[in-house]
Amino acid sequence: LERLLFVWAKLNKKVKYLNGMSEIAGTIYFVLATDYHEEWAADAEADTYFFFSMLMFELQELFSPEYIESESGIQNWIGTYNDMLSLHDPELKSHLDACGTCASFYILPWFATLLCREFSVPDTIRLWDTMFASTNKVVFLKYVCCTMMMLIRD
């Protein structure tokens, strides 16, 4: 995992390494390394690198500094998440605002790890399976985060 992230960081200098990247790569590696086809599991490191690279490219708005303040960057992600929460649970959104709770305190770690810290490994794999099958992974992720807040509101 260390080799994989080191090589990826060296080849992608425009993207800033975030702590969540190791959790994402680790979860991907776990899935591939524990495949019941031993010949497939033997290539888990190379396959993880490829999958991780493709995923980071697709989610570059989250990890690339050039997107931080852009229309598609992380600030936009947080803004659209806030809009979703306002739409689906205005009472909760008002309460969080009244308490001075900024969504970035909890939403950034959720986005940066694709929620793998919030769930057990089997649940994360199940969630990711659905997310990766989605045509819009970012919107799916935002809806899951919004739903999580609505479920833990009390």
Image (cartoon, rainbow, N blue to C red):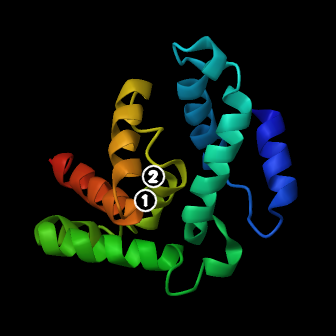
Left or right? Give the position of 7 relative to 129: right
**Does the rendering let one see residue 103?**
yes
Left or right? Give the position of 126 relative to 92: right
Count the marks: 2
What residue is at 51 percent from the left and 13 percent from the top? 36
As rendered, which of 112 and 129 lies closer to the eye?
129
What residue is at 62 percent from the left and 57 percent from the top? 56
- Say the numbered circle drawn on residue 41: none
As rendered, which of 23 and 131 lies closer to the eye?
131
x%, y% of residue 124?
40, 35
As rendered, which of 92 and 67 lies closer to the eye?
67
What residue is at 49 percent from the left and 78 percent from the top? 75
x%, y% of residue 46?
73, 35
Which residue was labeled with disc 2? 110
Which secondary structure lies at badge 1? helix
x%, y% of residue 6?
84, 45
Kindly indicate whether the residue at mark 1 contacts the one at mark 2 (C-beta within 8 angstroms). Answer: yes
**Image vertical order of residue 129 relative to residue 39, above or below:** below
What residue is at 15 percent from the left and 75 percent from the top? 87
Q: Residues within 10 Å of mark 2 (few under 14, many from 20)?
A: some
Check the picture and name the quadrant holding the N terminus: top right
**Image vertical order of residue 105 relative to residue 100, above or below:** above
As rendered, which of 107 and 48 lies closer to the eye?
48
The three-letter code of the residue at mark 1 reads: Ile
**Does the rendering let one see residue 19?**
no
In the rendered image, which quarter is residue 42 located in?
Answer: top right
CA gap, disc 2 and disc 1: 5 Å
x%, y% of residue 78?
41, 72
The three-letter code of the residue at mark 2 reads: Trp
Q: Residues within 10 Å of mark 1 (few under 14, many from 20)?
A: some
- Say the numbered circle drawn on residue 107: 1
Which secondary structure lies at badge 2? helix
